[in-house]
Amino acid sequence: KAGVTQTPRYLIKTRGQQVTLSCSPISGHRSVSWYQQTPGQGLQFLFEYFSETQRNKGNFPGRFSGRQFSNSRSEMNVSTLELGDSALYLCASSEGSSGNTIYFGEGSWLTVV
Amino acid sequence: DQQVKQNSPSLSVQEGRISILNCDYTNSMFDYFLWYKKYPAEGPTFLISISSIKDKNEDGRFTVFLNKSAKHLSLHIVPSQPGDSAVYFCAASSLSYDKVIFGPGTSLSVIP
């Protein structure tokens, strides 16, 4: 089974721009979660989608948004980028029931200059 | 408010010895706990999990212990190997949560 795939792996954006990151979950997984990791910080939960619906949301500003498609693929978008948005963005998928293990992709490294 | 805590930012252990990584949680609703290992520039890799109905789960060199009354869990790695050097994240979830909450991580260095 293919793992969680994230694209692009690396990108550089300018302050004020917007960015879209993509995630393809493991086949059969219906839940996709997004996390942000900044240097020295743990994994901060952004949001979680299940069957195209956002089930949970972390404490991030409205500039951070996401969506999930009918094939479970997910995208997250960050608008009006700030320097502090530079981070590793990780996508994880699971079957969707509580008690399921989540599996991560390799992440998308975003640098805002 | 940090619901999952890993109070040791770093740990150094000699190769062949036991590594013990600790994790504390505050939310008594958590009933499923996981450990992940992360190398630089890679996504976290699932290591081992434990349900709240158990107090121990073992997988090869990795054993997780859960003390529900103390809201504490630990990961034991025996014997430790240089390839185990990584950041280890403790995580927790619950039936009412649907999301997985991670601790800040502990950086383990295994010295040859």
Image: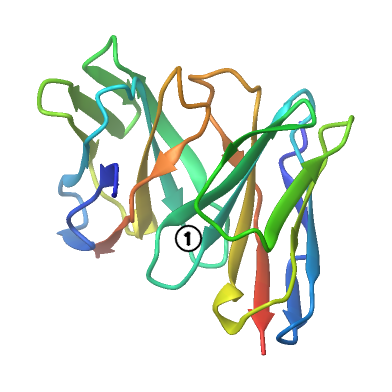
Look at mark 1 in the image and give the residue it sits on: B39
> Residue B95: x and y, percent?
45, 17
Task: Name which quarter of the figure residue A51 lies in.
Answer: top right
Q: Nearer the viewer, residue A80 or A106?
A: A80
> In the picture provided, is A2 more to the left or to the right than A71?
left
Residue at 39 percent of width and 27 percent of height: B49
Residue A106 location in percent, x, y?
Answer: 65, 55
- Measuring from the top left, give residue B101's x and y in whole percent: 42, 40
Number of callouts: 1
- Which residue of the protein is positioned furthest toward the right in this rendering? A70
Seen at 26% across and 12% down, the residue is B54
Q: Residue furthest left?
A: B70
B69 vs B85: above or below: above
* Residue farthest front in this picture: A62
Colour pattern of the rendering: rainbow
> Where A94 falls versus A9 (above or below)?
above
What residue occupies the far top of the structure in this picture? B53
Q: Secondary structure at mark 1?
A: loop
